[in-house]
Image (spheres, rainbow, N blue to C red):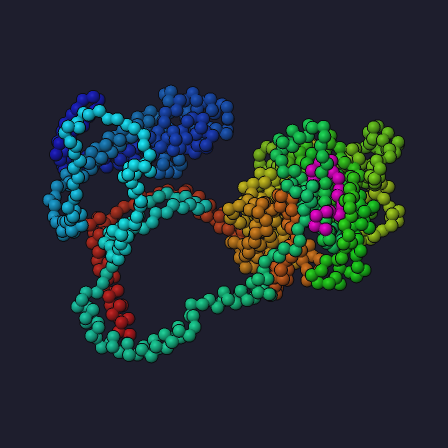
């Protein structure tokens, strides 16, 4: 066999024989042994970080690979790196060796097999350097020779074979189509004398001339309407090709195949088994039981799942039809809210059936800036609805700009605080309209109201809807620099100082607010009169003059209007990198006291002048307050980038700079693929939080720092809002972009919602439930078109199951233990991996040849066939 080899522009031809190939293989083995023996001396293993690989351009799988594993590094570059980075340099432990190296370039080799324990090794002298380079060149030459031998061997195996007919030519001849009928031939001729005669064209009417117009009407040809009762078609059955992906760890692909063929009994074995006595005895013994089984199949369905049917019966009280939300009423204002977006919903704390919504324009921030430059701008409003008039609101609260979020004061429902899109905080006082809002309420308590009937309000709607003007607006200069996305009242049992220290609340009223904004700040506000020492001259002059408010505007908070400043500021620095978090929603663990409803009812029904006004309350001195140590000062925060973190609002003294700064968050998790729009605590477990953002939602437990207890898969539509059920600990609702509401029951399913119901055709913006009575629960759902939908919650979603509270608590505890277990297993696997990597690799030796291994496998397979055949006959005999 002749092989032609081209090298250095010269074509050389030589003959390759089996003896030459054996010699080449022997030479390659000797070269490898010499290389391994040489490399064990004067070789320095190295660990190069990713930064060092970038500096010396020896990045793995990019600059150095398994085929080209070495690189010559200049000695001057290594010395400069050791001078620049000092002890941080990866070459610093071998500083003396590098400085004494005689040549200008050092050989750096990528050790893919970790032969010397590290990913790189360095030649310590010139002799080792030349030996390593020569071994790599010999390896390349040997690989080229082996590839040439393989190509020659493959070509020699190709042989031309003659065609052998196995019967397919007969089938091809039978399927060949032939023309059976005789084809028709047409010939068109003309009289010879008319050849070349002139032609005259004239106009004529086809109705007057006979045979001048012939209509060819379409008709059905019966030759083409024959139904084929039988047809010979060749079909090849192949498996469908599908491509799919999942969020799993990618592994290296490996070639694997499985070849199998059916094994059947021969005709002699079949006849022998059918005539055997064991088979006849077996059929006679099971005939009676087989007949009884057939009769049972005719009587009942043996494949029916009784457990599934049992769960369907226990899941609801009123059947499957009682699981759906029912439309109770809808509200929309033809002038103020139609075509706009509802940003927030709040039920009145004490007046049943009174709900308030915030209306915003559905425009982009850039368009909002362009509209702000106009001289004439329309005001924004909060609309308060009752169930007597679905078109005209009962009261409208005027705002200087669109309201993103608002809340009623827990201790005094006449006070409403709202957050504007321009970064200001607005306050309203509804004391003058309290009688109008209450209407003709019954004297009985809310629990004695008739079932499925809201309190009867004044059915006669007014001709004009009254407007309540805002009492105070915060200063733009000292407020947020972006829109305020969330606002919350601090509980009535504590207040904070300017350093964030919780102290005792002497008044027993909710007098402080907390707001957050994407400008990376959280601000605390106090609605009482500030101290005279912190007021500017302009503010003192304003208070001394006691300017009269415009007509119809209460003077409750005139001491704050346009001069209201935050009392405490919290900045959210990132955990590991520079920069700050941009909060969107926040939640605190502390809640109001048990007497908050009594305080709210008292302030709602009080006579004007009976209690102290907010304008007469002053901020007390810090020395007169008693510090509280049992107050949780952590805020659970969802950011604009989908991150979840919690931070302490108390200011600590920095050790390095000595300044009072906000401590860094201890943990941060990026679980949502979009801005977080919901951070809400469970009404049953204060340490359980629901967060919604992007296309996912998650459930967290405060104190568990290993991640969320439950993290949903990405949904098809964007998740816009969420809310816990007020009566069932295991139930929560998720609003979607397509107008659907997903109802999740953790005791039934955790991988998919238990129920999905469509509410509207546009995106859902907010969800807020309310308990009217023991037999009537309502759910307020708003959309991006300005419509407020009031839905009635069915019995199955408002009545808790037996021991539901304890079962849900046990589920959360199990999930927390699961996270701890996986974290422990992860640490253990990493330790084992490091131990395995630290052990030196032992070369494997094949004690047996390939022919011996194949013979053993064949012998084992033959033994397996005999045992299987004996087992089959034994089963038939039974």
Left or right: 154 as drawn, with respect to 72 = left
The overriding secondary structure of the stretch rendered in magenta is loop
Query: Where on the picture, by quarter, is residue 476?
Result: top right
Report the quarter where the C terminus lies: bottom left
Residue 661 visible from this viewpoint = no
710 is higher (above) or lower (below) than 652? below
Report the quarter where the N terminus lies: top left
Left or right: 686 as drawn, with respect to 79 = right
Q: Residue at x 70, y 48 (%)?
A: 391
Q: Is residue 11 magenta?
A: no
The front one of 230 and 793 is 230
Residue 22: percent from the left, percent from the top?
A: 17, 37
The front one of 534 and 420 is 420
The front one of 796 and 805 is 796
Query: Where on the picture, by quarter, is residue 196?
Result: top left
187 is higher (above) or lower (below) than 777? above
Q: Residue furthest front?
A: 208
Query: Where on the picture, by quarter, is residue 11?
Result: top left
209 is higher (above) or lower (below) than 631? above
Residue 214: percent from the left, percent from the top?
A: 29, 40
Q: Residue at x 67, y 46 (%)?
A: 332
593 is higher (above) or lower (below) than 468? below
Label total for image: 0
Residue 366: percent from the left, percent from the top?
A: 62, 31
Residue 130: percent from the left, percent from the top?
A: 30, 26
The front one of 670 and 747 is 747
Q: Is residue 402 magenta?
A: yes
Q: Which residues are magenta?
A: 389-403
Residue 715 visible from this viewpoint = yes
Q: Residue at x 85, y 51 (%)?
A: 606
Q: Residue at x 78, y 42 (%)?
A: 468
């Amino acid at each position: 066999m002749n092989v032609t080899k081209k090298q250095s522009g010269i074509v050389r031809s030589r003959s390759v024989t089996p003896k030459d190939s054996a010699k080449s293989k022997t030479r390659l083995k000797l070269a490898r042994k010499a290389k391994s023996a040489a490399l064990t001396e004067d070789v320095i293993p190295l660990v190069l970080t990713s930064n060092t690989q970038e500096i010396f351009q020896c990045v793995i799988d990019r600059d150095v690979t398994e085929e080209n594993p070495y690189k010559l590094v200049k000695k001057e570059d290594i010395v400069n790196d050791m001078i620049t980075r000092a002890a941080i340099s990866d070459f610093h432990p071998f500083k003396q060796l590098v400085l004494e190296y005689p040549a200008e370039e050092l050989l750096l080799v990528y050790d893919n097999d970790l032969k010397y324990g590290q990913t790189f090794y360095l030649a310590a002298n010139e002799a080792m350097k030349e030996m390593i380079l020569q071994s790599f060149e010999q390896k390349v030459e040997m690989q080229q020779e082996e590839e040439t031998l393989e190509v020659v061997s493959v070509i020699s195996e190709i042989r031309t074979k003659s065609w052998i007919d196995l019967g397919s030519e007969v089938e091809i001849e039978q399927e060949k189509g032939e023309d059976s009928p005789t084809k028709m031939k047409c010939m068109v001729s003309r009289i010879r004398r008319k050849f070349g005669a002139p032609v005259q064209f004239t106009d004529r009417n086809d109705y007057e001339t006979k045979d001048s117009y012939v209509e060819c009407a379409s008709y059905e040809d019966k030759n083409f309407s024959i139904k084929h009762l039988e047809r010979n078609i060749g079909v090849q059955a192949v498996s469908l090709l599908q491509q799919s992906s999942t969020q799993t760890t990618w592994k290296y692909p490996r070639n694997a195949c499985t070849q199998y063929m059916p094994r059947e009994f021969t005709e002699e074995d079949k006849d022998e088994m059918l005539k055997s006595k064991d088979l006849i005895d077996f059929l006679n013994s099971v005939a009676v039981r087989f007949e009884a089984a057939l009769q049972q199949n005719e009587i009942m369905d043996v494949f029916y799942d009784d457990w599934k049917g049992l769960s369907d019966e226990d899941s609801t009280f009123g059947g499957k039809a009682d699981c759906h939300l029912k439309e109770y009423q809808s509200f929309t204002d033809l002038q103020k809210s139609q075509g706009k977006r509802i940003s927030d919903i709040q039920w009145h704390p004490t007046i049943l059936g009174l709900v308030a919504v915030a209306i915003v324009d559905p425009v982009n921030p850039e368009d909002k800036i362009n509209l702000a430059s106009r001289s004439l701008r329309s005001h924004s409003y909060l609309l308060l609805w009752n169930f007597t008039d679905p078109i005209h609101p009962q009261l409208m609260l005027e705002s200087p700009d669109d309201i993103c979020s608002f809340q009623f004061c827990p201790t005094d429902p006449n006070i409403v605080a709202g957050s504007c899109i321009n970064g200001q905080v607005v306050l309203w006082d509804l004391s003058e309209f309290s009688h109008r809002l209450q209407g003709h309420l019954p004297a009985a308590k809310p629990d004695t109201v008739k079932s499925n009937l809201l309190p009867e309000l004044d059915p006669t709607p007014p001709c004009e809807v009254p407007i309540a003007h805002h009492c105070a607006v915060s200063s733009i200069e000292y407020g947020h620099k972006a829109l305020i996305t969330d606002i919350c009242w601090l509980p009535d049992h504590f207040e904070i100082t300017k350093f964030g220290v919780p102290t005792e609340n002497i008044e027993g009223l909710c007098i402080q607010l907390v707001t957050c904004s994407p400008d990376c700040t959280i601000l605390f506000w106090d609605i009482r009169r500030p101290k005279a020492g912190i007021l500017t001259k302009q503010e003192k002059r304003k208070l001394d003059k006691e300017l009269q408010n415009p007509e119809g505007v209460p003077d409750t908070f005139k001491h704050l209007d346009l001069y209201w400043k935050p009392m405490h500021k919290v900045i959210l620095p990132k955990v590991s990198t520079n920069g700050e978090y941009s909060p969107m929603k926040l939640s605190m663990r502390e809640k109001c006291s048990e007497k908050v409803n009594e305080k709210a009812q008292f302030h709602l029904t009080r006579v004007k002048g009976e209690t102290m006004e907010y304008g007469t309350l002053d901020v007390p001195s810090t020395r007169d307050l008693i510090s509280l140590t049992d107050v949780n000062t952590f805020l659970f925060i969802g950011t604009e980038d989908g991150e979840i973190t919690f931070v302490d609002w108390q200011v600590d003294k920095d050790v390095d700079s000595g300044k009072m700064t906000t401590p860094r968050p201890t943990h941060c998790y990026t679980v949502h693929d979009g801005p977080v729009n919901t951070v809400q605590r469970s009404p049953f477990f204060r340490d359980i939080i629901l967060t919604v953002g992007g296309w996912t939602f998650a459930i967290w437990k405060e104190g568990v720092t290993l991640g969320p207890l439950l993290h949903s898969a990405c949904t098809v539509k964007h998740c816009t809002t969420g809310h816990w059920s007020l009566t069932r600990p295991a139930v929560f609702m998720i609003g979607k972009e397509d107008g659907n509401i997903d109802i999740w029951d953790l005791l039934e399913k955790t991988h998919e919602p238990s129920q999905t119901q469509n509410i509207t055709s546009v995106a859902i913006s907010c969800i807020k439930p309310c308990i009217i009575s023991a037999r009537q629960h309502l759910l307020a759902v708003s959309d991006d078109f300005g419509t407020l939908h009031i839905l009635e919650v069915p019995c199955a979603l408002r009545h808790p199951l037996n021991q539901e509270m304890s079962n849900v608590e046990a589920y959360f505890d199990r999930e927390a233990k699961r996270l701890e277990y996986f974290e422990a297993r992860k640490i253990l696997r990493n330790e084992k991996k490091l131990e395995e990597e630290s052990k030196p690799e032992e070369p494997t030796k094949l004690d047996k040849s390939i022919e011996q291994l194949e013979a053993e496998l064949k012998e084992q397979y033959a033994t397996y066939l005999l045992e299987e055949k004996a087992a089959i006959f034994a089963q038939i005999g039974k």
